[in-house]
Amino acid sequence: DAGVIQSPRHEVTEMGQEVTLRCKPISGHNSLFWYRQTMMRGLELLIYFNNNVPIDDSGMPEDRFSAKMPNASFSTLKIQPSEPRDSAVYFCASSLVSATGAFFGQGTRLTVV
Amino acid sequence: QQQVKQSPQSLIVQKGGIPIINCAYENTAFDYFPWYQQFPGKGPALLIAIRPDVSEKKEGRFTISFNKSAKQFSLHIMDSQPGDSATYFCAASHQGAQKLVFGQGTRLTINP
């Protein structure tokens, strides 16, 4: 199994630009999570989906952030417009709803200048 | 109530020693307590997990001790090795593996 695949691994963009992060969960997993990691705030859950349906988006910081899961094998996290304070490592994770243990991807390091 | 408090922030141990990392929680609805290990440039990887119906769980050199009444749990690493140097996160959730709440992390260094 290839694990959770995220792209790009690194993204540098200018303030005000739109950024799209992508995630392919582990095949067969039906829960998908987006986390953000910073030195100041640690690992924060932004949003999670069960069976492609958003369940809890209370961690999404602002309306500038949006996430979609059009099918079981793909999800995106979009930031529009991006700001320097969005600079962080964004992780996607997946799991089985009925099981335990979430598996994380390698992350996307986003830098907004 | 959703917080998980982790200590210490950093820890340095000699090879062969037993580092201990502690976590405390408030939400009594939490029913799943995993530990994750993260190396630089990598995503967190599930190391070991426990549910509140047992007080201890061992997997290889890693042991979780769980104190339900005190709402605390800890990770012990036996015979620690330099390769164990990483950042360790405790976490908690209810509803199975959904919506993990993470501690702030402990940067562990094992000196040769």
Image (cartoon, coloured by chain):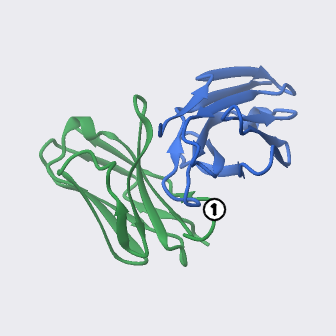
> Residue A38 falls in which quadrant of the image?
top left
Q: Which chain is blue?
A: B
* Percent x, y of residue B28: 59, 43
Residue shown at 71% from the left, 20% from the top: B12
Q: Is residue A110 left or right of residue B84?
A: left
Give coordinates of residue A104: x percent, y percent: 53, 56
Percent of width and height locating residue A91: 44, 52
Q: Viewer-proximal residue, B79 or A98?
A: A98
Is there any visible trace of residue B41 in the rendered image? no
Residue beneath the point at 42% across and 78% down: A72
Q: Decide: few, some or many residues near mark 1? Use Cα within 10 Å; few <14, some 14-19, many ≥20.
A: some
Question: Percent position (x, y) of residue B23?
Answer: 64, 32
Label 1, secondary structure: give it.
loop
Q: Can residue B27 be spotted in the picture?
A: yes
Task: Decide: is B79 above or below B57.
Answer: above
Chain A: drawing colour: green
Q: Is residue A108 above or below residue A111?
A: below
Tell me the residue at 40%/33% (across/down). A41
Placement of the C terminus of chain B among the 4 image quadrants: top right
Q: Observer-nearest residue: B77 or B34?
A: B34
Q: Residue at x 53, y 77 (%)?
A: A27
Q: Which chain is disc 1 placed on?
A: A
Three-letter amino acid code at the position of disc 1: Thr
B94 lies above or below A112:
below
What is the number of callouts on the image? 1
Residue that label 1 marks: A100
